[in-house]
Amino acid sequence: MDSFFPGIALLVISIALVASTTDRRSKAVDRRLQRLERKVDLLLAHAGVAEPEDPKLAEIDDLLAQGKKIQAIKVHREVTGSDLVEAKEAVERRMR
């Protein structure tokens, strides 16, 4: 019983270290991805190339024309994989 508690403490510390390392790597990958996306956007703008629009975005415009904002947000989330707040903001931008 005396060796049980130090074993659990060691396990908890090990899990915390692994989680911390994974989180740092994830943040680093996210930063790199954001930098790459900015660079690609700049290259596309410089070349005068517009990003092809997904046909589903036309469905979002149709839903907005019908006054179905919530359904439009749902479709935007399905198409882009964005979270609720991001999808809501994007749909509201399309409404203007």
Image: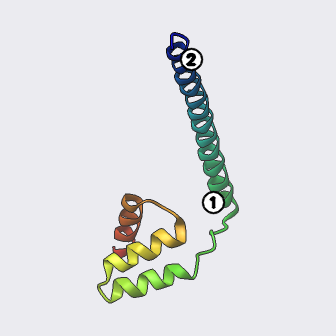
Q: Secondary structure at mark 1?
A: helix
Residue furthest out toward the left: 67
Q: Badge 1 is on which residue? A: 45
Residue 22, position as x, y percentages in the image: 61, 34
**Horizontal arrangement in the rendering, residue 85 relative to residue 11 (left or right):** left
Q: Are marks 2 and 1 in contact (CB under 8 Å)?
A: no
* Cα distance between the residues tagged 2 and 1: 57 Å
Q: Position of residue 82 (x, y in %)?
A: 48, 61
Compare residues 32 and 75 and report the one nearer the observer: 75
Residue at image position (67%, 57%) is 46
Residue 11 location, x and y as percent?
57, 23
Disc sitting over residue 94 in the figure: none
- In which quadrant of the rendered view does residue 10 lie? top right
- Closest to the observer, 95 or 24: 24
> Within 10 angstroms of label 1, few (less than 14), some, or many (20 or more) residues?
few
Camera-nearest residue between 68 and 5: 5
Looking at this rendering, what residue extends furthest in the front direction?
A: 1
Sequence-first tag of 2 and 1: 2
Q: Which mark is residue 7?
A: 2
Mark 2, other Cα within 10 Å: few <14 / some 14–19 / many ≥20: few
Which residue occupies 67% across, 67% down?
49
Residue at left offset 32%, top offset 78%: 69
- State the image quarter where residue 73 is shown: bottom left
Query: Mark 2: which secondary structure?
Result: helix
| Position above or below: 16 against 2 | below
Quadrant into which the C terminus falls = bottom left
**Disc 2 residue type (three-letter):** Gly
* Residue 80 in the image, given as x and y percentages of width and height: 53, 67
Amino acid type, label 1: Ala
